[in-house]
Image: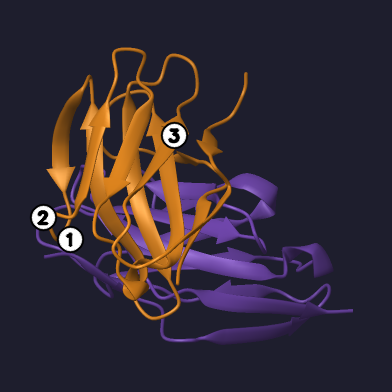
Chain colours: A purple, B orange
Amino acid sequence: AQSVAQPEDQVNVAEGNPLTVKCTYSVSGNPYLFWYVQYPNRGLQFLLKYITGDNLVKGSYGFEAEFNKSQTSFHLKKPSALVSDSALYFCAVSRGDNDMRFGAGTRLTVKP
Amino acid sequence: KAGVTQTPRYLIKTRGQQVTLSCSPISGHRSVSWYQQTPGQGLQFLFEYFSETQRNKGNFPGRFSGRQFSNSRSEMNVSTLELGDSALYLCASSLNSGPNSGYFGPGTRLTVL
């Protein structure tokens, strides 16, 4: 079965600094990897996905993620954090269907 | 294009009752997936419906069921509610079945007393 680990419950960064939210995965076969963001009392918003192709995936709101097969990682990055990026971030993996397995989430706080 | 809508947004029920939640996907989308989000278990996949057929099912008891109508709207039903069913129920719609980006609705917050 597929699974995802987000090793950090909380990430704090200063506005303007680069941010990284970590994700590692376990899946048999080729992974389909996703990042979502959730704001308070809201559903999930899609940020980006990796299915195949370039290991560096660019997504919404200036976010990007790098797929690293040897390290089974899919870390989310942004060069310059904004206060408005503060939210709960979820990494998810699928084997190619909609049975997505989500990580526990990482709460990102960007301080002014 | 209107987004995914879920009704009701909030619901309070008592143990033993049953509840039906509704999800209207984005126009033209034929796949609807349901997820349960709780503080303890996080986000868990319930099931997916595509063209009125259940395509995948997560590891939930039979009290959780769903269906999809010909207009792609989907309902999920939970019978004999338990306290642990209190959660945010999210649905996601996508054009086809498969690894979808998932346009999620705002969710239905179910509280079981």
Q: Check the image and report above or below for B45 versus A110.
A: above
Residue labelled with disc 2: A29
On-image quarter of the N terminus of chain A: bottom left
* Disc 2 element: loop
Identified at 36% across, 13% down, the residue is B71
Residue labelled with disc 3: B23
Residue A45: x and y in percent read: 57, 49
Chain of the residue that carries numbered disc 3 in the rendered image? B
Q: Check the image and report above or below for A33 versus A103.
A: above
Nearest to the observer: residue A80 or residue B112: B112
Q: Check the image and report above or below for A90 versus B32.
A: below
Q: Identify the amino acid type marked 1.
A: Phe
Nearest to the observer: residue B28 or residue B77: B77
The mark that comes first in sequence, 1 or 3, is 3
Q: Nearer the viewer, mark 1 or mark 2?
A: 1
In the image, are marks 3 and 2 on the same chain? no
Asked whether the residues under the numbered discs 3 and 2 touch, taking CB atoms below 8 Å apart as contact, a structural biologist would say no
Q: Identify the amino acid type marked 2.
A: Gly
Residue labelled with disc 1: B60
Indicate left or right for A84 with A57 as reference: right
Residue B68: x and y in percent read: 27, 26
Q: Residues within 10 Å of mark 3 (few under 14, many from 20)?
A: many
